[in-house]
Amino acid sequence: MKGNPIRGAGYLLRGLQMLPDPQIRPFVLVPLLTNIILFVGAIWLLFSQFGGWVDALISAFLPDWEWLSFLHYILWPVMAVLVFVMVYYSFSIVANIIAAPFNGFLSEKVEKRLRGDVITDEGWQAVIALIPRSIGRELSKLAYYLPRVLFLLLLSVIPVVNIVAPFLWLLFGAWMMAIQYCDYPMDNNKVSFKNMKLMLKSDRFTAIGFGGLTQVGMMIPILNLVLMPAAVVGATIYWVEAHASTEIDLDQKKLTP
């Protein structure tokens, strides 16, 4: 596999550094507010319902037999991780669907900024025009995500096999973060979802580095509130510098610069 995870992580850091840029700052506001509102909601929900959800999951997988009660203490931390992961990814999906048109708009402005074009405020009409395409693209990501996450959930409850489940969750999460945010600049440039995945696979380690640091940042309180727009900006820098001049030959299943 090709790529450099350090370079990939660097794109996110550069995205963070670029957020205060006066030319793109106005377009950061809506993704930022969306992220704040939804993640505050996720935290509140976890604190209020966490114990009940964990107990419900354990009851679903563990028969109500007294002699098996000791397994409750073994399963509790595993199910706690599953609840956290499911809530985290569920709210991430909702946040990305709501913010998708604004993230696409932000990515477009960042690309213009990087290429030296003059950035003009095209107003709400430009954002509204992006909504149908952006939501359709988010649904494509969801269709890609759900079968794989269900498979990982299955692995997580199989004895012995579930030892490697946390590593697989982290790896898959990093890959999905790369897909989620790199899709905005690629969609703006009419790269299909299938072709976008081929591009990232051709530079997989870089994509994993970018997505991995994004995933870690999303789990850090306060920092996670600015990670969505930072990841959009970082992914756009990644697109401009690494993929904008790449063409895909679907018949031969290869990438040509």
Image (tube, rainbow, N blue to C red):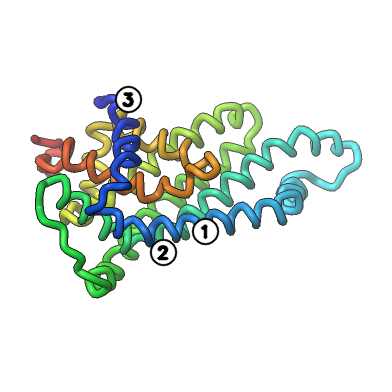
Residue ID at (17%, 37%): 241
At mark 2, the secondary structure is helix
How many numbered circles are shown?
A: 3
Quadrant location, the C terminus: top left
* Nearest-to-viewer mark from 1 and 2: 1
Q: Nearer the viewer, residue 173 or 149?
A: 173
Q: Amino acid at mark 3?
A: Ile
User: Mark 3 sits on what residue?
Assistant: 6
Which circle's residue, 3 or 2, is located before the other in the chain?
Answer: 3
Q: Position of residue 77 (x, y in %)?
A: 71, 36
**Within 10 Å of the Cα at label 1, are there few (<14), some (14-19), or many (20+) other Cα atoms?**
some
Q: Amino acid at mark 1?
A: Leu
User: Mark 2 sits on what residue?
Assistant: 98
Which circle's residue, 1 or 3, is located before the other in the chain?
Answer: 3
**Within 10 Å of the Cα at label 2, are there few (<14), some (14-19), or many (20+) other Cα atoms?**
some
Residue ID at (90%, 37%): 67
Q: Amino acid at mark 2?
A: Ile
